[in-house]
Image (cartoon, rainbow, N blue to C red):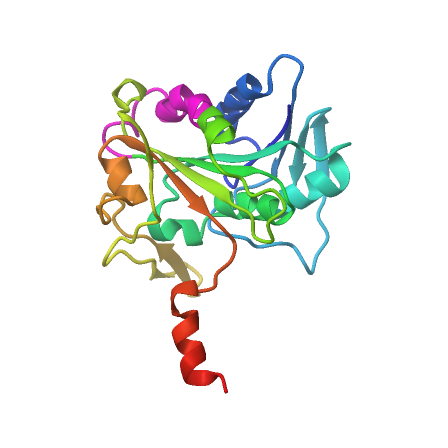
Amino acid sequence: MRILITNDDGINAPGLAALHSIAQGIAGKNGEVWTVAPAFEQSGVAHCISYTKPMMITKFDAFRFAVEGAPADCVLAAIGDIMPARPDLVLSGVNRGNNAAENALYSGTIGAALEAALQGLPAIALSQFLGPKNKDIPDPFEAAAQHGAATIRALLERAPWENGADYRLFYNVNFPPIRGRDVRGQKITTQGYRKDTFFGTHPYTSPSGRKYLWITGGPQDVATEPGSDVAANLEGFVSITPMRADLTAHDVVENLRLDFDT
């Protein structure tokens, strides 16, 4: 199997090293693992692409490249220029911090998987939820490292992939904020919503008198509704959320047509 891995934390991120080990196990001894990742951290860029500027590519070795661009750019660069043939699977992560609930909308990790799906490729985004039980242990990515390969194999073997669909499925996986040995299993989930948890701004005045704004986040340990991603993670489960790039609110289309269409 030929696997492409990328992320939004950057080419030197420890989570990418963890994903490389996971991917090697999936690819097998005769497989290939290609790394095409951002040269610098690109957290929060979602599905951004460098549409108005060129990207510089740096080759570190035969299978490892850095792109001065966003995670979605990395997928485009890999399949359009760097790799000799299209990958069989695209893995994005392992992100430092969860990409569950509303975080999914901002995530460059998910943006890369979304772009892969738009390109007709099977894709999985993987993120490691951090909390008091794992953020300060020797390997904060322990849960992902120990359960990542089994989760990916389960998806490849049992999950639908909708080959040929206009907006094909991809999967968003979040590993719980606990030690690997304490993970309770996997759950298929919906995307949750943390109530009263929003991104905001914090003003700062520099020594030169200029005003800057820092983006601030909200609490991450706020449980979402039962059956959703954060709820499962806080209960100790790996959450697996099927996603599509189609943003249409299909549940309201027919009623709107009755009111608007003539």
Residue 3 occupies quadrant: top right
* Residue 250 vertical placement versus 235 (above, below): below
| Residue at far top of view | 29
x and y percent of residue 185 in the render?
Answer: 30, 26
Residue 69 appears in the figure: no
Looking at the image, residue 132 lies above or below residue 253: above
User: Magenta segment: does it hold 139?
Assistant: yes
- 135 relative position to 119: left or right: left
Q: Nearer the viewer, residue 118 or 101?
A: 118
User: Residue visible at 30% across and 22% down?
Assistant: 137
Q: Nearer the viewer, residue 13 or 229?
A: 229
- Which residue does the image show at 71% across and 40% down from the upper left? 79
Note whether residue 241 is visible.
Answer: yes
Tell which of 262 and 122 is nearer to you. 262
Front residue of this view, candidates 34 and 165 = 165
What residue is rendered at 24% in x and 28% in y?
133
Q: Quadrant of the N terminus?
A: top right
Q: Where does the image place residue 115, in percent across and percent down from the top left?
A: 59, 48
State left or right for residue 208 relative to residue 176.
Answer: right
Q: Position of residue 73 (x, y in %)?
A: 64, 47
- The residue positioned 51% from the left and 29% from the top of the image is 156
Q: Is residue 143 magenta?
A: yes
Q: x and y percent of residue 37 in the render?
A: 60, 37
Q: How many marks?
A: 0
- Give the residue at the far bottom of this rendering: 262
Name the image quarter holding residue 186.
top left
User: Magenta region: which residues?
Assistant: 131-151
